[in-house]
Image (cartoon, helix red, strand yellow):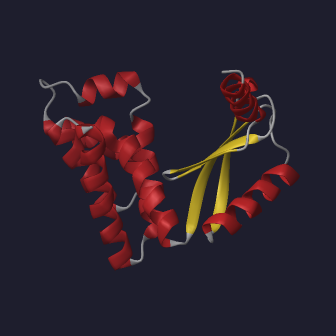
Amino acid sequence: MRRISSAKRYAQAVFEIALERNEFESWQEGLKKIADLTTDNKLMALLENPSLSFAAKKSLLQERLGETNPLAFNLALLLVSKGILRLSGDISQTYNELLDAHRGIERAKVTTALSLGDKERDAISHRLGEIVERKVVVDAQVDPSVIGGFIARIGDMLIDGSIHQKLETLKRTLVEVGR
């Protein structure tokens, strides 16, 4: 929990800076570059090595990040100095959520039994958009246990229109009637 709240605070601060300077895309790109660094285990071992000087770590970051938003680079340096560079993925994700909210976009995690085609994805996006009264972008996942229909999660809202759920409801109803 502490990790998530810490990442959220950094993301909110970064978002405020991006909003003030109208630099949404450069921050988004910079945060993604920083987050991508954490996938390189050798680089992370060097950046987390306490015996390596900060100047050497800074040089490694400059080399790997290349041209990036100078303030995003400073954030990377701060995260390295605090030993929490691994938070950058959570920071980037939270920043993207804040940016989407600012632009009036909601993200929906939609789980279906089969992969969605563009037509189905657009139809679900449109219908969910009507429900939440915002533009909805669908992040689709496949889970055969859904059987049919879909399960959508938008923020804290859960919409379960799966065949699995309908069968479970029918099962409970039949058990209650039999008592």
Q: On the picture, is 122 further left or further right than 39?
A: right
Q: Nearer the viewer, residue 170 or 96?
A: 170
Residue 67 visible = no
Residue 176 visible = yes
- Does residue 165 sit above or below 9 in this rendering? above
Q: Nearer the viewer, residue 94 or 50?
A: 94
Task: Please tell me which residue is depicted at 79% across the width and 51% down the height of the picture.
Answer: 121
- Does residue 162 sit above or below 8 in this rendering? above
Q: On the picture, is 24 further left or further right than 46?
A: right
- Does residue 52 sit above or below 10 in this rendering? above
In which image quadrant can residue 74 be found?
A: bottom left
Q: Position of residue 177 (x, y in %)?
A: 71, 27
Task: Please tell me which residue is depicted at 65% across the width and 61% down the height of the picture.
Answer: 136
Task: Please tell me which residue is depicted at 42% across the width and 55% down the height of the picture.
Answer: 30
Task: Please tell me which residue is depicted at 22% across the width and 27% down the height of the picture.
Answer: 48
Image quadrant holding the N terminus, namely top left
Q: On the picture, is 178 further left or further right than 95?
A: right
Q: Position of residue 128 (x, y in %)?
A: 69, 60
Q: Position of residue 10 (x, y in %)?
A: 27, 54
- Does residue 70 sit above or below 54 in this rendering? below
In which image quadrant can residue 3 be found?
A: top left
Image quadrant holding the C terminus, namely top right
